[in-house]
Image (spheres, rainbow, N blue to C red):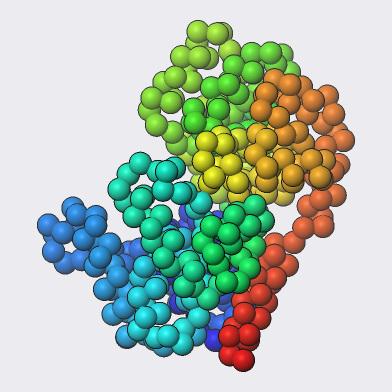
Amino acid sequence: MKVLVVTFSDVAFDGRLRELIRVCRMLGPVTVLERKVLMVIEDSQSQRQLPLKYYCSIHKAKQFYREKGPFDIILADNRLALLPSYFIKRMDPNVFLVSDARELYLMHDVKGLSSKIGCIVERFVLPRSNAVIAANIFRAQFMENFYKLKSPVLIYENLRKLSFGNKTPKDFENTKLAKIFDTEKINVISTSGCLITRGNDQLVYAMKDFQSEAHLFLIGRSPDQDVTRIRRIIQENNIGNVTIIDQVDEATLKYILSRSHIGVVNYHQNDLNNQFCASGKIYEYLFEGLPVLTTRNPPLRELVELNALGVADDHYTQGLRCLIDHFSEFKKSVIAYTECVSIDNNNLKLAESIRERIGVRKK
C-alpha cells in the first residue's frame, strides 16, 4: 500500500511525526508532503497573508496528488493537515484517511480566529475520517463522544527515545556544558523552559528548600517576559541552584539527561488539551533512566503511580522531597518499566490496527 503523509510540521524537530512515519513504512512506501511544499506560493504579496497561504496549500496538495497519486492511505498529521487531506479524499474516495488528532482544544478554550476555525475543521473532518488517532485513552474516550465517531479511536502513545545521532558522549567532554553539573547534588531537569503557564515559577520557588542537595536546570525557549520573571524570582530570593539553558538539539539534550537524576513534567489543567496531556517528554526521561516529578494531570498521575516511576504532586517541594528520599527505589522501578516497554511494538500495534480497519472497510 502506498502512503502519503501530509504535514505542516518539521520532521527534524517532531518526535511523534518521525515515529508515525516509521509506522507508515510498515504499511508500504511512504511519501511525505511537507510544509515547505504546501506553503510555497509565487505571489510575494500573498506570502504575508496566512489565510490565503493556507488556502493555496489546499490547492497545492490536490495538485501534488494529481501528479504523484493515487495513494492507498493518507495520514493527516495534526489539525492543519486535515483540510488538505480531506479535499484529496474528496478527489479520490477510495483513499483511506487516517487523522492524527494531537490537540484537544474546544471552541471555548481558544481565543484566536484561526484556532477557532481549527476547532470547526476538526469537528467536520474527524467524523469523516476512516480512522482517528489519539495519544492516550483519556483523549480517545472524550473524542469518541464529543465528535460522535463511528469507530473507536486508535490509541498511539507518545513513546520515544532520544538519540545522539552522529555524536557521542565524548563530544561533550571538556565543554562548558559538561562543567555546569554539580556531581555532589541531585540534578533536576525541566524541558518546559521558563514557562509560567507550566508552573515553573513555583518550581523555582521550591528549589530554595533544596539548595544544599539539588540543582534545577530549566531547558527550552520561553517568552522574554517569562524568562525575566524567573530571573527576578531567582535574584530576589537568593536561589543559587537554578540554571537557565536555551533550547538545545536532541543530542545535547540526551547528554544533559545522562548527567541528570530527576525529570520534571508539568502541565496546567485549564483546558482539555493540557488536562489530558500526552507528554512525549516523560518517555524521554524514563528511557534515560530518570524517575519523574509530574503534576497531577490524569494521564501523568496514572502512568507514574501505577508503575512507581516517581511522584505526581502539584506541590513541588513535597513531591521533590519524596523523590529524593526514595530515589533508589524509583530508579529501580523506572529501569524495570522501560525494559518492558517497546517503541517498535507501539508502532507495530498501530500499523496492524490500521490494516485491520482497511480490511473491514473493504468487506
Quadrant containing the N terminus is bottom right
Q: Position of residue 141 (x, y in %)?
A: 63, 57
User: What residue is drawn where x is 47% and y is 34%?
Assistant: 246
Q: Position of residue 35 (x, y in %)?
A: 35, 63
Q: Position of residue 318 (x, y in %)?
A: 73, 21
In the shown orientation, is residue 11 left or right of residue 164? left
> Which is more toward the observer, 344 or 313?
313
In the shown orientation, is residue 121 left or right of residue 197? left
> Which is more toward the observer, 5 or 285?
5
Residue farthest toward the bottom in the current orientation of the protein: 363
In the shown orientation, is residue 195 left or right of residue 87? right
Q: In the picture shown, does residue 292 fall above or below 210?
A: below
Quadrant containing the C terminus is bottom right
User: What residue is drawn where x is 24% and y is 67%?
Assistant: 56
Q: In the picture shown, does residue 295 fall above or below 52?
A: above
The total number of labels drawn is 0
Q: Quadrant of residue 203?
A: top right
Q: Quadrant of residue 63?
A: bottom left
> Which is more toward the observer, 51 or 217?
51
Query: Does residue 137 appear in this view?
Result: yes
Q: Position of residue 163 (x, y in %)?
A: 62, 54
Query: Does residue 184 appear in this view?
Result: no
User: What residue is drawn where x is 68% and y is 23%?
Assistant: 315
> Which is more toward the observer, 360 or 354?
360
User: What residue is drawn where x is 28% and y is 62%?
Assistant: 54
